[in-house]
Amino acid sequence: FKESRTLFKNNLLRLQLTELQKAVTSEVQHRQKIEGFLRTVRSSLSSMKTRTVPADFSGMYPGLTPRRPGFIRFIQESFEISAPARVDLVGSFLLDASAKPRLGADLAVEMPASMLHERDHVNFKYLNKRAAYAAEMAKH
């Protein structure tokens, strides 16, 4: 403990640490811009309207094709997409621990329970619903 205290009192080490902290700490104005953008994204996602998606949603979302199992008897019914149950900010941006040069923010989006059914983990149904939900959020 005493050794670290004497090292910090050394002017050269203290100057190096101060410059390093300035180099990696994000500036307030950048954080405020990102926070404003995140508020806009959150309100946009919260205002999503309920929409019925057909089982074969490749026409609605170009480049996204539903997965199908290898056997023939695959029936996936249409489902409804609605606003997320929760949209939360998570990760280092929330804790004010993000560093330069790339500031990033993580959003956790919870799909509404009304979209999911008990057996959706079978036959790629959950994966298809999740892919369609992500595509709908990107469109919105």
Image (cartoon, rainbow, N blue to C red):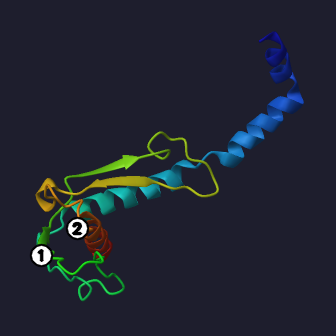
Q: Residue at x 61, y 48 (%)?
A: 99
For the residues labelled 1 and 2, the Cα–Cα distance comes to 11 Å
Q: Please tell me which residue is depicted at 19% across the width and 53% down the height of the picture.
A: 85
What residue is pinned by disc 1?
78
First along the sequence among labels 1 and 2: 1
Left/right placement of residue 78 relative to residue 128 reads left
Give the residue drawn at x 81%, y 30%.
14
Give coordinates of residue 102: x percent, y percent. 60, 58
**Residue 129, x across and y down, in percent:** 23, 68
Q: Is residue 34 left or right of residue 71?
A: right
Q: Is residue 91 visible?
A: yes
Residue 95: x and y, percent? 47, 39
For the N terminus, the quadrant is: top right
Q: Is residue 22 above or below residue 48?
A: above
Within the image, what quadrant is residue 84 found in? bottom left
Q: Secondary structure at mark 2?
A: helix
Q: Quadrant of the C terminus?
A: bottom left
- Residue drawn 81% across and 10% down? 2
Instruction: Sort mark 2 into few (<14), some (14-19) or many (20+) by Cα contacts within 10 Å.
Output: many
Expressed as whole percent of the image width and height from the top left, the position of residue 37 reads 39, 61
Which mark is on residue 124? none
Is 65 on the left-hand or right-hand side of 2? left
Name the mark nearer the viewer: 1 or 2: 2
Q: Residue furthest top?
A: 2
**Residue 125, which numbered label?**
2
Q: Secondary structure at mark 1?
A: loop
